Image (spheres, rainbow, N blue to C red):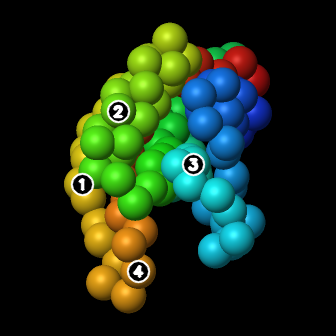
Amino acid sequence: MINYHKEIYSALNSVLPTHHELALTSKEKTPCYSYQERDNADTDTGNTLGYSRISFTVKVWSSDIAQLQHYALEADRVLRPLGFKRVSSNELADRNSTMIQKILTYEALGLENY
């Protein structure tokens, strides 16, 4: 298993305050990012190395749609050098508040030595 949490956190936190999705609370100031690993699965394995498909969900939190767009592009910019590509994107609004989210999914193929 390849662990990319540190790299994802560092890359996103260079742009905005970043929190793991499971530790996020309503007290966090926005705009901010949250992230969570979605999948980390072996795809091809051999005797000494293999490939793993790694997937993360990144959310941009804000009350301003222009900020969502800007920081979604920034997430792309800092995650691409790590080998991640965006495979989905959508928006979600909370009808009980002014908070909106841009939900981005990123995938990478990582080489793992055994």
Mark 1 and 2 residues: CB-CB less than 8 Å, in contact? no
Picture quadrant where residue 4 is located: top right
Task: Specify which label sits upstream in the sequence, 4 or 1.
Answer: 1
Viewer-proximal residue among 27 and 89: 27
Which residue is disc 1 drawn over? 90
Q: Secondary structure at mark 3?
A: strand
Q: CA distance from mark 1 to mark 2?
A: 14 Å
Amino acid type, callout 1: Asn
Which residue is disc 3 drawn over? 32
Which residue is disc 2 drawn over? 70
Which residue is disc 4 drawn over? 97
Crowd rating for badge 3 (residues with CA inside 10 Å; few <14, some 14–19, many 20+): many
Crowd rating for badge 4 (residues with CA inside 10 Å; few <14, some 14–19, many 20+): few
Classify the position of the C terminus by image quarter.
top right
Q: CA distance from mark 3 to mark 2?
A: 12 Å
Picture quadrant where residue 103 is located: bottom left
Residue 72: in sight, yes or no? no
Crowd rating for badge 1 (residues with CA inside 10 Å; few <14, some 14–19, many 20+): few
User: Where is residue 24 drawn, in percent x and y?
Assistant: 67, 66
Mark 3 and 2 residues: CB-CB less than 8 Å, in contact? no
User: Where is residue 51 drawn, in percent x and y?
Assistant: 52, 26
Q: Residue at x 50, y 12 (%)?
A: 81
User: Where is residue 73 drawn, in percent x and y?
Assistant: 35, 28
Residue 9: in sight, yes or no? yes
Task: Specify which label sits upstream in the sequence, 3 or 4.
Answer: 3
User: Where is residue 46 drawn, in percent x and y?
Assistant: 58, 23
Amino acid type, callout 3: Cys
Task: Specify which label sits upstream in the sequence, 1 or 3.
Answer: 3
Amino acid type, callout 2: His
Amino acid type, callout 4: Ser
Residue depth check, mark 3 versus mark 4: number of the one nearer the observer: 4
